[in-house]
Image (cartoon, helix red, strand yellow):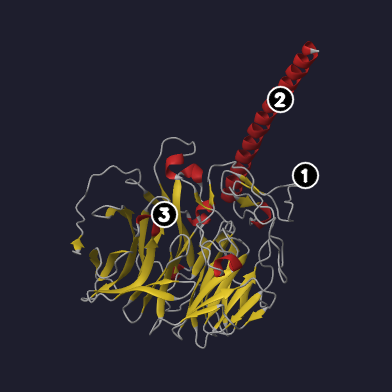
Amino acid sequence: MTVIKMSWRPQYRSSKFRHVFGKAAPKESCYDGVPITRSVQDNNFCAVNPRFIAVITECAGGGAFLVLSVHHTGKVDPHHPRVSGHRGNVLDVKWNPFDDFCIASCSEDATVKVWEIPPHGLFKNMTVAWKELQGHSRRVGLIEWHPTAKDILFSTAYDYKVMIWNLDCPEQVIKNPVRTISQHTDVVLSMSFNSDASLMATTCKDRKVRLMEPRSGTLLQEANCKTHKASKVVILDNVNKMLTSGTSRWNERQIALWDLDDLSVPLMEENLDGSSGFLFPFYDPDTHMLYLAGKGDGNIRYYEISSEKPYIHYLTEYRSNLPQKGMGVMPKRGLDVSLCEVFRFYKLVTVKTLIEPLSMIVPRRSESYQEDIYPMTAANKPALTADEWLSGIDRGPVLMSLKPGHPVDDLYSHTNKGPGRSHGRAGSYIGEQPGGIGGRTGNNGVADDGRTAVSNGQDFLLCSPPKTENELRVKFHKQQDDIRRLVELLHQRDVRIKQLELEINNMKNSQQNSL
């Protein structure tokens, strides 16, 4: 297989994402005064979902991370409560993809802990975890949730092992993982799964890229390219490819594309620049767009992926003079579809103790919902249980539409809450995102599960009160938009009621005539 060198000369090809641009949030929509960790671990240090943002912070005496409402923008109180139950520095945090109130963290104290965040955020420091996973012998550097199975968590540590944990059990302290993978000879640097998690790719400090079957830990393929030292990996499942970022033999930052069916040699390699920071790849399977963000850089390159040569098409680059230490990514269901937003980063800017939201937007003149850029996407609903996956079943993600006002789906009415849960999980909109009204509510605007109603993607009790006249004006206009939307919805329902009443009267008249 020949290695193709990529050319960055402008290639004029038809693409709806050719003019995507990055738009940084204004200062009042950023999170200011966040003491971001100074750890040298090459992780993102930040995790985001439609309700909360979690960021690892610098602290003395153990490790901690901050959990803020995504709407709690502006200056952050330096004494804001934290999750502080680890005895060593926290190295990674990840939100449960199927529960916006559940987050996992790993630490230098060799443990993984799973936390249940109260529905309205933290009002005091949290030190007691819902689950504690004790199995690693050295510090745990990386964790990942299973993309489709409920309550399955992967962890990897400096003991060179990857452990698989089943959280669906009554014990608060779990000491035995359901599976331990011992295929690596050095520290695992990154993990990535395909859409149904039947494949797991890892990069390791021993320069090898491994493709495994995660359930059994069977090694399927192994790549050891002398011209490319991989540090991060992401599986491009819908084009049957895999991309790694790392360095060349001359220590230049480099990306390499691989065929999942043959890892003997990369399909292509491309040197980017001579900077020293790690390159973090982010892939959006819905739009086939790849984003490359360098640690210590201010810019983000983005590309479009295709299944045919030359495979990777350079689009453009977002430039900023604020270097990022890490990046959080908002799930698709949390994006603002009214702005044609297709991706949203949360940049950790250490030099300014700032978290800056950055939206990637497709420029469109119409303000209506753009179905061509929002295909069905992964929902916050598991496709199978932990026991089903462990028994040998693989299943792709449950899909949802991002169209505002999508019908209700009761996500967890068929599942048990399990002992030790701090809140209910039932009653959620499958289409909960800006532009829709999430949660089944009663007369007081409170959802059936006790959570407050979400309108236009915002939980009113989680929003911080306006502090300036400008913030007050913005919130006033948002409320006016909500009121207009609700009035229009009521009008549409009144019209529908009258139509149904007319149909009923016609049916009655026709029955009387027939008699």
Check disc 1 and report its element: helix, strand or loop.
Answer: loop
Regarding residue 277, the answer to whether it shows in the image is no
Residue 124: quarter of image: bottom right
Q: Which residue is mark 3?
A: 285
- Indicate the secondary structure of the residue bearing disc 2: helix
The answer to which of marks 1 and 2 sits earlier in the sequence is 1
Q: Which residue is mark 1?
A: 443
| Separation of marks 3 and 2 at Cα, in angstroms | 42 Å
Residue 468, horizontal then vertical, whole percent: 59, 53
Q: Residue at x 42, y 41 (%)?
A: 372
Give the amino acid at mark 2: Leu
Callout 1: few (<14), some (14-19), or many (20+) C-alpha neighbours within 10 Å?
Answer: few
Instruction: In this rendered view, identify the residue nearer to me: 445 or 475.
Output: 445
| Left or right relative to 419: residue 332 | left
* Crowdedness near tag 3: few (<14), some (14–19) or many (≥20) residues, C-alpha within 10 Å: some
- Rendered image: mark on residue 2: none
For disc 2, the neighbor class at 10 Å (few under 14, some 14 to 19, many from 20) is: few
Q: Could you tell me how far apart the alpha carbons at marks 1 and 2 are, in whole angstroms?
A: 24 Å
Instruction: Point out residue 326 in the picture as x, y percentages from the top left corner.
Output: 43, 68
Q: Quadrant of residue 7?
A: bottom left
Residue 74 vs 495, above or below: the answer is below
Q: Which residue has dot 2 on it? A: 500
Looking at the picture, which amino acid does disc 3 mark? Answer: Pro
Q: Amino acid at mark 1?
A: Asn
Q: Residue furthest bottom?
A: 137
**Residue 405's x, y, as percent?**
60, 41
- Contact check, label 3 and label 1, Cβ < 8 Å: no
Percent from the top left, x then y, of residue 203?
Answer: 37, 74
Of badges 1 and 2, nearer the viewer stands 2
Front of the two marks 3 and 1: 3
